[in-house]
């Protein structure tokens, strides 16, 4: 299935979860948050939250600013 | 002799900044944006004495680390996520929720700006976002216009502080409307933090003299020719301005008043 991650289309296996998206980012231990289609997906349920075909996923972290 | 003791204790009295029940020894809140690199930022943060520092939330890239967070953790400085870049209440609310998840804090510097040219807060979206975030359990510190009415409305919906601008972000134009800042301070039941527009140390001192509880600045330090030295200057200015405020300045007079005995 196809999922848009941080603005780029990516292919994932049918049974993929949010945790699989994080692999591409090195699965950081902290300091990262994920939203799927505008809702926060808490770290505790990354493994158990299936990706939805056509979903928009945003992976954010803190950077210098403000 | 006893007078000297009193004077010393006044200068070193414990005078913490208290926001939402949390105490901070420093009344200087800094940003991390604009620093040439993390080494420069580190020296500036240490020199500033800050205990609370803003970070922005952005899309992670594959190589991206969490460098600025690691730095703040190492220095023992609390990270205050902001919602910089958000134009609508909906964007700001989602960004705040992501920040809460990523940084494990329910504190947020709420920023909802109207356009890139001025970066001025959009008051309608700001108030809407503030209300929603307070309802969602956040400790909301809104970056707001220097508008006493909007400041009051933000306090009314439950914001833990109000953070009026001195002048637009990054301009270094100082406090363009000191009277408005004084009116906000006079009416506020929550701490007032002068946020944005600080150019140099005297601006920070002025903010504190006007009665602000703290100053938030970034560009004035990070883009100064010597950020570490400017951070030290800001630290001293905030302390000096605070002491002057507590001391109570003399009234302004039209005519001279001799300070030596008249013959």
Image: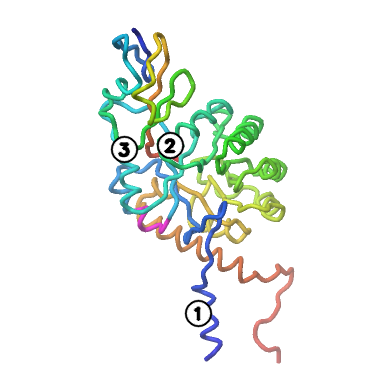
Instruction: Please tell me which residue is depicted at 56% across the width and 68% down the height of the picture.
Output: B243
| Front position among marks 3 and 2 | 3
Determine whether B89 is above or below B143 in the image. above
User: Residue B234 location in percent, x, y?
Assistant: 45, 58
Question: Reading the chain from its start, which is encountered first: label 3 or label 2?
Answer: 2
From the viewer's perspective, tell me whether residue B153 is left or right of residue B129.
Answer: right
Determine whether A41 is above or below B153 in the image. above
- Chain identifier of the residue bearing label 2 in the image: B
Secondary structure at badge 1 equals: helix
> How far is the residue under mark 2 from the one under mark 1?
40 Å
Question: Reading the chain from its start, which is encountered first: label 2 or label 1?
Answer: 1
- Magenta segment's dominant SS is helix
Q: Which residue is mark 2?
A: B56
Image-quadrant location for residue B37: top left
Check disc 1: other Cα within 10 Å, few if <14, some if 14-19, many if 20+: few
Q: Which residue is mark 3?
A: B66
Determine whether A34 is above or below B166 in the image. above
Instruction: Give the residues in magenta.
Output: B44-50
Secondary structure at badge 2 equals: strand
């Amino acid at each position: 299935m196809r999922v848009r991650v941080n603005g780029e289309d990516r292919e994932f296996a049918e049974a993929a979860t949010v945790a699989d998206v994080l692999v591409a980012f090195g699965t950081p231990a902290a300091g990262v948050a994920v939203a799927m289609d505008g809702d926060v997906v808490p770290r505790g349920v990354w493994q158990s939250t299936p990706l939805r075909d056509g979903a928009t996923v945003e992976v954010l972290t803190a950077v210098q600013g403000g | 002799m006893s007078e000297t003791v009193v004077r010393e204790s006044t200068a070193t009295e414990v005078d913490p900044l208290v926001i939402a029940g949390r105490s901070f020894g420093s009344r200087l809140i800094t940003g991390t944006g604009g620093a040439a690199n993390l080494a420069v930022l580190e020296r500036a943060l240490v020199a500033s004495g800050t205990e609370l520092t803003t970070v922005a939330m952005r899309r992670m890239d594959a190589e991206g680390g969490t460098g600025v967070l690691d730095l703040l953790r190492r220095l023992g400085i609390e990270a205050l996520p902001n919602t910089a870049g958000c134009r609508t209440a909906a964007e700001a609310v989602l960004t705040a929720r992501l920040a809460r998840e990523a940084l494990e804090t329910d504190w947020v510097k709420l920023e909802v700006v109207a356009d890139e040219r001025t970066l001025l807060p959009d008051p309608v979206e700001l108030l809407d976002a503030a209300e929603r975030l307070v309802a969602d359990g956040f400790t909301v510190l809104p970056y707001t216009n220097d508008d006493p009415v909007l400041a009051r409305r933000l306090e009314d919906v439950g914001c833990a502080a109000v953070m009026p601008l001195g002048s637009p972000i990054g301009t270094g134009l100082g406090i363009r409307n000191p009277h408005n800042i004084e009116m906000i301070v006079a009416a506020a039941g929550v701490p007032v933090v002068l946020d944005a527009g600080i150019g140099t140390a005297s601006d920070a001192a002025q903010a504190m003299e006007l009665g602000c509880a703290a100053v938030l600045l970034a560009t004035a330090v990070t883009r100064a020719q010597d950020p570490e030295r400017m951070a030290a200057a800001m630290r001293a200015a905030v302390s000096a301005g605070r002491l002057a405020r507590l001391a109570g300045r003399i009234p302004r007079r039209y005519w001279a008043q001799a300070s030596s005995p008249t013959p």
